[in-house]
Image (cartoon, coloured by chain):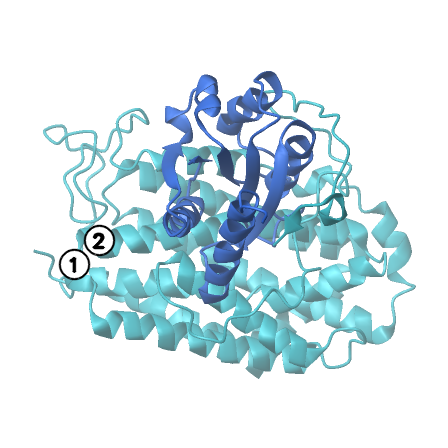
Amino acid sequence: MKAAIIYSSVTGNTSTLAEIICENMSKYTIETDLIPVDEFHPEQLHNYDIVTVGTYSWDNGELPLEMEEVFEAFEDEEVKHITTGIFGTGDSFYPYYCGAVDIFRDMLYVHTNLAVTLKVELTPQEEDLHRCKKFCDRLASEFAVVS
Amino acid sequence: MTQVDQSLSKIKLLNPTYPNKATGIINGESSGLLNWNDIAYPQMYDLYQTLLANFWKAQEINMQDDIKQWDSLSETEKDIFLRINTQLASLDSLQTPTMTHVMDYVTDSSFKAIFAVISQQEAVHNESYSYILSSIVPLREQNERFDQAKEDPMVRKRNQLILDSYEAFRENPTPQRLFELAINSINLEGIYFYAGFAFFYHLARKQKMLKTSTMISYIQRDEMQHAYFVSQFVRILLTENPELNTKENIQYVYQTVDKAVQLEKEWADYILKDIEGIDIGEFHSYVEYLANKRFRQIGLDNFYPERDNPMEWIHVFSDEMMNETKSDFFEQKSRTYTKVSSSNGFDEL
């Protein structure tokens, strides 16, 4: 089983979150690639069983420009069988806290097997570490053997 | 090696033998010419663009609705409204000249440019308070209110923390004092505004004085970027000058921000006590939550207990709330997906 984490970060908050999630994934012995958005190609999606996307939100809770390509890749490629999770960091002082997570959520629900979403305020805190673990638990549980 | 207590010298306007790309934000070599395509911290260009994209001016906001509503406010609300207005104006009045003053000692031209933009925005904030006042009370009362702000012992005590540090830098501009100034600037922009913001957003929740709160929302959006920039400035200052990155200075940050937190709580106890619907205890936790955010922005750990935002209604208005037509350079794509939630079979954490 292979997983990818595709993410974009400006202040470092989302990349910190991506790394925490990556570390958690490795505990399930799921081979995980950490892909910054500028190294992403749409056809890469086909290499993975699990794809998680990490994004910050911009201004009025919008997608950052550089995440548009990732968004469109899920719309254009054949990804129905892929299990996905969307996570992001945001600041509740702006309207539509983590709005880009919601935008991805609605699209991923239609095109993929969306399992889980996660929002974190700025830098991940102690409490968020548990939530990151849950996030990965949920993704991995999609592949648990039903006996 | 940086001598943290040695005065920084005022930089010459042009130093043709030095490179355009500065070798340091203080005590660096820099020609003084700015080419945004060749700067030491390229992310500063994004920040500069974000600041410019926030551009607004007070006169664009039509105050008619607020003028009509003013008389429907209770006497207490009117009094608090005017006191908070002049108190915020006095904070912004400090910030405009301080930001331009710092420019003289910062060697990186891209940082100078950003300080210039921040200073300009503080000037607009200052004007917006005057603009609000001119809409609702005659000049005589405006002047009385400014005198009241100048004499109010609580306001003076709050301002003193900031003033001491800003004046110390004016007197002897050392790297140490620049660092302290930056921390106090975070206090001013990132902590001291929030009891005031709470009051205006609270009125907005009751659909009162919405034009004023629209301006407050623009101001908050600017101040958030300023606090973010200053926190980046602090991180870079400490990284480039490890002599400043000492236990004592980290302690200084915790102590000084904590002082500001206590003063903001005291101010809230005093100014918001008669405002129904704002829970002062909750506001105390809010200020601690806010300060934790500031610590994390400069790369430090939380000082207060970790908690979720206890007053989520204190936030910048959405574009829709401000009826703002998007003036973006690119059109926002319309997306046609239906809103889904955890009832659709996935988990929302």
How dense is the environment of label 2, judged by Cα within 10 Å: few (below 14), some, or many (20 and up)? few
Which shade of the palette goes to chain B? cyan
Q: Residues within 10 Å of mark 1 (few under 14, many from 20)?
A: few
- Residue at the disc numbered 1: B242
Residue B7 sits in quarter: bottom left
Describe residue A45's horizontal placement relative to residue B214 as left or right.
left
- Taking the spot 15% from the left edge, 30% from the top edge, the residue there is B19
For mark 1, name the chain: B
Question: Of residues B93 and A19, which is closer to you in this image?
Answer: A19
Chain A: its colour in the image is blue
Circles 2 and 1, Cβ within 8 Å, touching? The answer is yes
Q: Nearer the viewer, residue A41 or B9?
A: A41
Q: Which residue is mark 2?
A: B239
Q: Mark 2 falls on what kind of element?
A: helix
Q: CA distance from mark 2 to mark 1?
A: 6 Å
Q: Position of residue A1 (x, y in %)?
A: 43, 36
Q: Is residue B195 above or below residue A93?
A: below
Q: Nearer the viewer, residue B77 or B14?
A: B77
Left-right relation of B303 to B265: left
